[in-house]
Image (cartoon, grey):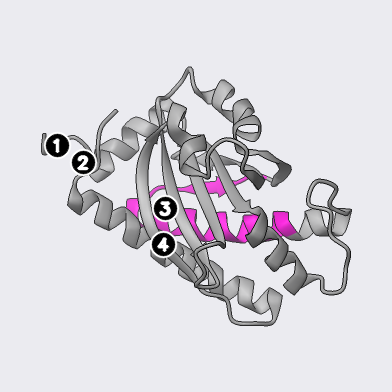
Amino acid sequence: MEKLNFNEQDLLTEIGSIGTGHAATAMADILGQKITITVPHVELVSFDRVAEFVGGPGRNLACIYLDVLGDLPGTVLVMFNENTARRLLSSLIPDTELNFFELSHLQQSALMELGNILSGAYLSALADFSQQRMYLSVPRLAVDMAEAMLSVPMAKLGCKSDYALLVQARFFEESSNRGYILFLPDPGAALRMMGIFGVGSDE
């Protein structure tokens, strides 16, 4: 797997910051309160290390899955750790009982909409920079431990490509509130992305 050099890392972090900045504005309108989202880290991650990057074995996550269509097809996953999901839902649907593993239909819909906004804003920033068309499918939601939840898309895409673009985000300026955007490009899209960003050109 190729490594990002400093300039590539800085560029993708900036794209992530622009996307999550737009998402924060849209999410603030929905939540009715200011929300901050910072992007401390962007990494090109091998499939076998994804679970480690999003919290390690045993970490519970809410994950929104969306198919990416257009010029850079693939799959995008938006993941909230339990603390972040609970705080977002308590802000959006206050005074409502919350069982993280048995979310109500309304709570599931709310998380899927927030994931849709976050992934849409990030991919829009990526598409604008790369001048590629990217569209999102209807979101799907799963709540489980990181390794179990990632097994299905990893099995589906692991035979096609060996890396994913991972954006780590911090919500509400608190280290315990974390979310992740994971873009798993199809093989042709992965090669196109590598060419656009020049990954490996300075080896």
Q: Which residue is mark 4?
A: 39
Residue 119 in the image: state x and y as whole percent: 55, 54
Q: Secondary structure at mark 4?
A: strand
The label number, if any, that marks residue 198 in the structure image: 2
Q: Secondary structure at mark 1?
A: loop
Q: Dividing the image into 4 quarters, which one contains the N terminus?
A: top left
The residue positioned farthest toward the left in the image shown:
202
Res 131 seen here: no
Q: Is residue 187 magenta?
A: no
Q: Which residue is mark 3?
A: 127
Q: Which residue is mark 1?
A: 201
Q: Residue at x 65, y 30 (%)?
A: 148
Crowd tier of the residue under label 4, counting other residues whose Cα lies within 10 Å: few below 14, some 14–19, many 20 or above: many
Q: CA distance from mark 3 to mark 4?
A: 18 Å
Residue 70 in the image: state x and y as whole percent: 50, 41
Q: Which residues are magenta?
A: 111-137
Q: CA distance from mark 1 to mark 4?
A: 25 Å
Q: Which of the 4 image quarters holds residue 141? A: top right
